[in-house]
Image: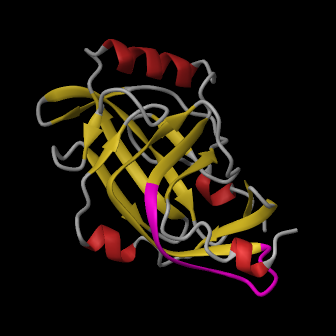
Amino acid sequence: SASGAQRAALPCGEAKREDVKFHSEFRAELVEKDGQDYYLVEGYASMVEKPYEMWDMFGPYDEVVSASAFDKTLAASPMVVFRFNHGGTAMATTTNGRLELEADSLGLRDRAWINPKRADVADLITAIEDRDVTEQSFMFMITNGEWNDDFTEFRIDEVDLDRGDVGPVTYGANPYTLIASRAGEFLSAIPDMPLLA
């Protein structure tokens, strides 16, 4: 295991990606926004107060995102993009009004309206419908966090989302997050989601 001096500096202050899995039945449907058709993709890019296992050069540790971690950055209206696997062309952004972010009791909720005329969007929606893509992630900077006494758990107390991203990924780490691409009401599965510690 790592000594306190070795592990204490990590991971606070580093750019980071947190990958999160969703598990829910979902479907892709077109919705209308501002007189145009879009696919609405919505879910949670991060869950709060739920430990999940991470690894660094010293081995495994648990990471927990605090319930208030997103408050300051969301209040500052960060510029965030929606894209697949943290790469490629942005499909929606907070600046064009087609990506919305909010924090609630479950975590960081994201809603993206993506253009069905784009080939990359069509490919993504097909992959989600086929359940080939079943996880989500967000990219951010940790601005405040702390280790517990024996350096087995790192708590992320505050993040900066500006110039980061959210969206589906091929592989993720956190097993608690939900996503869907659908019209109408949000995930009916959320109230029944297991609250695992």
Q: Give the range drawn in magenta.
A: 140-152
Classify 186 as above or below 146.
above
Q: Where is residue 35 in the image (x, y as percent from the top left)?
A: 11, 30
Q: Which residue lies furthest to the front in this view?
A: 5
Evaluate whether residue 51 shows in this view: no
Q: Where is residue 85 in the image (x, y as percent from the top left)?
A: 49, 33
Classify 29 as above or below 70.
above
Nearer to us in this view, 106 or 81: 81
Q: Main secondary structure of the magenta part?
A: strand
Instruction: State left or right for residue 141 relative to residue 21.
Output: left
Residue depicted at 81% across the width and 76% down the height: 3
Q: Which residue lies furthest to the left in this view?
A: 35
Q: Which quadrant of the structure image shows residue 5? A: bottom right
Question: What is the count of numbered marks?
Answer: 0
Residue depicted at 50% across the width and 51% down the height: 45
Q: Which quadrant of the structure image shows residue 58? A: bottom right
Evaluate whether residue 83 shows in this view: yes
Residue depicted at 69% across the width and 56% down the height: 193
Q: Position of residue 172 (x, y in %)?
A: 64, 42
Instruction: State left or right for residue 104 relative to residue 56.
Output: left
Instruction: State left or right for residue 66 relative to residue 84.
Output: right
Q: Position of residue 59 (x, y in %)?
A: 82, 58
